[in-house]
Image (cartoon, rainbow, N blue to C red):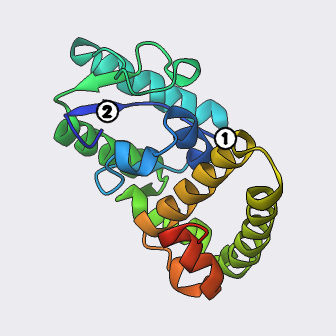
Amino acid sequence: CREHDTLKIGYARDPWIRMRAFHPRFHTFFDLKRGALIETDHVKEARAIERQLKLKFAAAGDEVPLQVRERARGKFEWFRGIHSQLMDELLAISNQLGYPMHAPLSNWLREQWLPQLDHLVGWCRHEHEQIEAWHFNADPKLVEPRSRTFRNLIDAWESIGLPINERLPKNVQHWYWHGFD
């Protein structure tokens, strides 16, 4: 977590989706430059690593941060004050098992999204068209959540260094910074 020395130990088939489940602005809640992951071939292996780490650091268990969405909180997965020891342990596990360790997490996420950049720009153009149509023709209660989610996604992509904002059409950039005039 960015604001304090609390961290989450867990596994995910898709880390991006998992982080979004925790918090709508996960990229500001979590410090993605301090995060890391080990890429395994099978879920069974990821679960074994998770179990090993949780046992090793059980004494440092901590409460779930209140900002984390209730449905994504989990139990016994949050720890405090062990970041450097955990990074050392992750590196040792990575070397022992021969699986790549990705740190910082923001670099790995950027590399996952970079090949899809052109597709994302097209998707953003389409999403903006939908939001614009709703803005002028629908109840604001329907439009605002979708607009907020869209802005959060653009913010998240920017936070990991994906140069999406500079590639967006001018009208989408204008909306992103100023809304609809």
In this view of the protein, which residue sits in the foreground, 158 or 137? 137
Q: Mark 1 or mark 2, which has the lower sequence index?
A: 2
Looking at the picture, does residue 120 appear above or below residue 19?
A: below
Residue highlighted by disc 1 = 42
Q: Residue shown at 22%/39% (left/top)? A: 3
Q: Is residue 135 left or right of residue 160?
A: right
Q: Residue at x 37, y 27 (%)?
A: 53
For residue 57, which quarter of the picture?
Answer: top left
Identified by mark 2, the residue type is: Leu
**Quarter of the view holding residue 160:** bottom left
The spot of residue 73 in percent (x, y) is 49, 20
- Viewer-side label of 1, 2: 2
* Secondary-structure class at tag 1: loop
The answer to whether residue 101 is above or below residue 113 is: above
**Residue 48 visible here:** yes
Determine the residue positioned at 66% across, 40% down.
Answer: 42
Per the image, the residue denoted by label 2 is 7
Instruction: Mark 2: give few (<14), some (14-19) or many (20+) Cα within 10 Å.
Output: many
